[in-house]
Image (cartoon, helix red, strand yellow):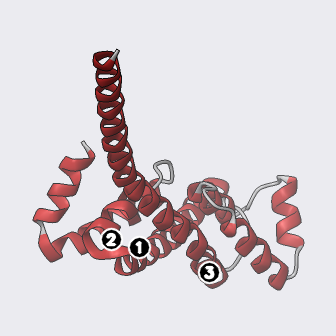
Amino acid sequence: MAQTILEFFSSLGLWAIPLSFLFTVLLNVLGVIPSIFVTGINIVLWGPWWGFLLSWLSELVGSSLAFWLYRKGIQQWKGGSKGDWSWIQKLNSLPRRKQQLTLVTVRLAPFFPSGVINVAGAFTNVQLIDFIWTTGIGKIPSITLEVVTFLGFQQLGQALQWLILALVIIGILLWWYSKRRQAVK
């Protein structure tokens, strides 16, 4: 399945860039499916640096759009009220700089679901511009970790092939040695 998706994106040439961008934005708006798979495709097609940049930019736009859409939906649903939960009240009572620091800190947590942060942020009084720049900073380590993880799995696959080859060779040598030893007896 992954190979089929990769081949599809690869067949698109440069059109894979906007498609990957839009797909990642959509995943962020939906907020339930991790985009690490798209990051992996971006790395394979465009290399670690350009793949990182495409993934980072599309996740930044997707998270920001999700935040804005969720906030609009919450305002319609609650009539402009942000909610009565204690964590919302606590975050809303913080000075702007502490809100920003809180957002950056939460974004820095690797593999923390981005959708949860997008939805939770929409319930607060955090300003959109603060959400955007803190997301931009906070996404750098998480996407870097995704890139490194994906490259590690790629190299693990190559290492595993060499390991299997080495084990087969060792197995053949041990079999040959045992047969030779039995012939000498």
Q: Residue at x 39, y 80 (%)?
A: 49
Mark 3 / mark 2, whichever is N-terminal: 2
Q: Say what amino acid the circle numbered 2 marks.
A: Phe
Within 10 Å of disc 3 (Cα), the crowding (few <14, some 14-19, many 20+) is: some
- How far apart are labels 2 and 1 at the CA level? 5 Å
Q: Say what amino acid the circle numbered 1 marks.
A: Ser
Compared to residue 10, the image places residue 49 above or below, namely below
Within 10 Å of disc 2 (Cα), the crowding (few <14, some 14-19, many 20+) is: many
Q: Position of residue 179 (x, y in %)?
A: 29, 20
Q: Which residue is mark 2?
A: 21
Dot 3 and dot 1 residues touching (CB under 8 Å): no
Name the side, left or right, on which 123 lies relative to 156: right
Q: Position of residue 35 (x, y in %)?
A: 43, 57
Q: Which mark is residue 20?
A: none
Q: Residue at x 46, y 67 (%)?
A: 147
Q: Which residue is mark 3?
A: 137
Q: Say what amino acid the circle numbered 3 marks.
A: Ile
Q: Secondary structure at mark 3?
A: helix
- Image quadrant for the N terminus? top left
Of 83 and 117, nearer the camera is 117
Q: Secondary structure at mark 2?
A: helix
Dot 2 and dot 1 residues touching (CB under 8 Å): yes
Of 180 and 1, nearer the camera is 180
Compared to residue 69, the image places residue 5 above or below, namely above
- How far apart are labels 3 and 2 at the CA level? 19 Å
Q: Which mark is residue 58?
A: 1
Q: Position of residue 7 (x, y in %)?
A: 16, 56
